[in-house]
Image (cartoon, rainbow, N blue to C red):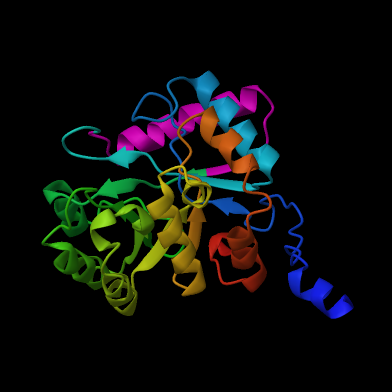
Amino acid sequence: MGFLKNIFKKKKKPIVYPFDFTDLVTDVHSHLIPGIDDGAKSLDDSISLILGLQSLGYKKIITTPHVMSDYYKNDKEIILTGLSRLKEALKLHKIDVDIEAAAEYYLDEHFEKLIDQKELLTFGKDMVLFELSFFEEPKVLDNIIFKLQLEGYTPVLAHPERYSYWHRSMDKYEKLIDKGVLFQANLGSFSGNYGPEVMKVAEKMVENNWLSLLGSDTHHMMHIQLFQSLKTNPFIHRLLNENKLLNSTL
């Protein structure tokens, strides 16, 4: 009887203890400078979001406004001026946070010109965060990667798990990694925020050790609330425990 009882006994799920994001140290993807893209709309919004990220355990923030020639015509001056205003507001409210700015560049002709002009905002050791169309793979992707590297930049692909045109050809991801592209996954992808297929691909990337960076991609307070639910996520735990992420080095 005891033998049969053990056969049909349900296996216990491993206990995953809650954590905060202190071990990550730095968030590398967010939209916190007010009024220049689809993120924070006001300084009050920015402050609330920054306090929210601090409450999760982050010690440093590298915020990355969109740069898209058709929608968000940001440049170095606009971004750095916005950062300066934000820092003044944080100082006024006595909020002690280490905050810098880079950008999330959309791969278009304007991005290519900025590479040629060496006018890119970087983080870490000349890392450049860029994103692609969600509808089709850019035909010039390989050329852009080569050009970035030729100019001494390290290409960091934002949320690769969200590009559905690669979900059925995972070898494409491997080829990009072989070319020296770093992958930055979004925290929200592990909660199903972008759909079950994106979550599945993000988990696969963890299993394959393809991720170099995690980013919050914070736009609004709903994102902060969403991240609370990830404190027992086994894939986030695995990323933190394996110590392969670069966030804490930035």
Position of the N terminus by quadrant: bottom right
Name the spot of residue 90 as percent of width and height, x first. Answer: 60, 28
Look at 47% across and 33% down and name the residue there.
32
Predominant secondary structure, magenta span: helix
Q: Which portion, as a residue range, is magenta?
A: 73-99
Of 248 and 139, nearer the camera is: 139
Q: Residue furthest right?
A: 2
Position of the C terminus by quadrant: bottom right
Name the spot of residue 102 as percent of width and height, x first. Answer: 40, 47
Whether residue 248 can be seen here: no
Q: Quadrant of residue 174?
A: bottom left
- State whether residue 137 is above or below residue 176: above
Look at 64% across and 32% down and name the residue there.
51
Q: Quadrant of residue 226?
A: top right
Magenta run includes residue 88: yes
- State whether residue 55 is above or below residue 175: above
Of 49 and 118, nearer the camera is: 49
Magenta run includes residue 84: yes
Whether residue 228 can be seen here: yes
Q: How many marks?
A: 0
Name the spot of residue 245 as percent of width and height, x first. Answer: 55, 66
Look at 37% across and 23% down and name the residue there.
35
